[in-house]
Image (cartoon, rainbow, N blue to C red):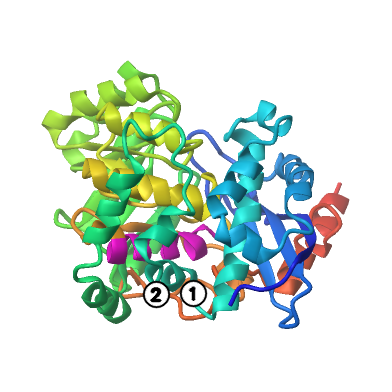
Amino acid sequence: MVRGRITGLAASDVRFPTSLGHHGSDAMHPDPDYSAAYVVIETDARDGLKGYGLTFTLGKGTEVVVCAVNALSIHVVNKDLEEIVSDFRGFYRQLTSDGQLRWIGPEKGAVHLATAAILNAVWDLWAKQEGKPLWKLLVDMDPKQLLSCIDFRYITDALTEEEAHEILQNGLLGKKEREEQMLKHGYPAYTTSCAWLGYPDQQLKQLCTEALKDGWTRFKVKVGADLPDDIRRCRLIREMIGPDKTLMLDANQRWEVKEAIEWVTKLAEFKPLWIEEPTSPDDILGHAAISKALAPLGIGVATGEQCHNRVIFKQLLQAKALSYLQIDSCRLGSVNENLSVLLMAKRFQIPVCPHAGGVGLCELVQHLIIFDYISVSGSLENRMCEYVDHLHEHFKYPAIIKKASYVPPQDAGYSTEMKEESARKYQFPQGEVWQKILSKP
């Protein structure tokens, strides 16, 4: 039973100094400090439950997203939660269509990241009040209720509400068996933790050896800074994992279109499954050209972690510009917008392989991809979800990996809640950790 009026919304800037160890380093982001604009929603309900939400950032700029959260809070505070979830489409549109704030979007950039953080908190609170993990809350909804959460504006030329209803209706067949399969075996994952661009060879070898012992069979390596070095590192990791395990490449938007085709062609000998983010995330036609050129080599194109919204995904799908679609739980407009993209991917028969890692992204996106398998795609063919082994210790309900698969969460909520001590110590700039770092000469 949904209950309570939202009485408070607090946003804070939480940053982890990951740049000190080159964690997360790639060709375009050599020194990221994994961070989050962290949102806490309170209500006047007697249960005392709170909703926790976040969006992922890389350090500087997190304060901008926090400001955007505060600007949007006027649409949230004093709202009844029941009023929100009974017309979630309308509430989503209210947040994204503020007549003044949309000018610094619309549905993109810092204001959209802020929207994601707020909505993630609302979904967390709703799932907690229902006593279910978020994925189960979604799985148990009937098609009509799921569709009522989605804004179909601007995508009906690719997916109508009627077509989406048919997809969900078809997904009811075998749903119980797929849920049981998830609970028994989990959702297949791949690791990016071994081969950040800033890692020296010895560290790469050590992490790769440990991952193989832990049962990992799918590995991603960062590329794009220097071709001879990419060839050397790809050869090193391919020799370590052997010819039968899966290798993916990630350039993090480094190249021009022609450059991407030429560069990846020279890495084709290492048999990568895909090249991720080969060029600008906004360049739909560029991705299409790269996809067409690399198809004869058996190399797909993956992208999506920095796609602003469902409209960009619509165009990527319509242009046949990607082979693997990568949703992000904190860049799109939370669960609501991700639902629309999952349904479009099903409509176009493109496998979804979510982006994760960062701060809390693994915790959140596991819910979405488990729901996708049970209720939408119904398939694990060519599908896997990213896993990065960083910062999970700061979450109250961390993602659990067993046998290189995500174990479906059982705790109620969206797994978004940080440990209070971590949120306090790593708050920027007043937290204990940052006070020590900033005080050094």
Tell me if label 1 and label 2 are in contact, CB under 8 Å.
yes
Which residue is located at x 43 percent, y 68 percent? 135
Task: Check the image and report above or below for 324 versus 229.
Answer: below
**Residue pictured at 44% horizontal, 57% vertical:** 203
Among numbered discs 1 and 2, the one appearing first in the sequence: 1
Q: Identify the residue shown where x is 76% and y is 70%.
A: 43
The picture quadrant where one finds residue 320 is top left
From the top left corner, tell me how far across and down residue 216 is, in percent: 29, 66
The residue that disc 1 covers is: 133
| The furthest residue to the top | 258
On the question of residue 387 being in view, the answer is: no
Query: Which residue is at a point 61% across and 50% down the rendered structure image?
Result: 91
| Vertical side of 145 occupied by 43: above or below | below
Which residue occupies the foreground of this view, 99 or 386? 99
Q: Of the residues shown, which amino acid type is indicated by label 1? A: Pro
Going by the numbered disc 2, the residue's amino acid type is Pro
Q: Does the stretch in magenta take in 296?
A: no
Magenta highlight: main SS:
helix
Name the secondary structure under disc 2.
loop
Residue receiving disc 2: 408
> Magenta segment, which residues?
360-375
Crowd tier of the residue under label 2, counting other residues whose Cα lies within 10 Å: few below 14, some 14–19, many 20 or above: many
As for residue 365 lying within the magenta part, the answer is yes
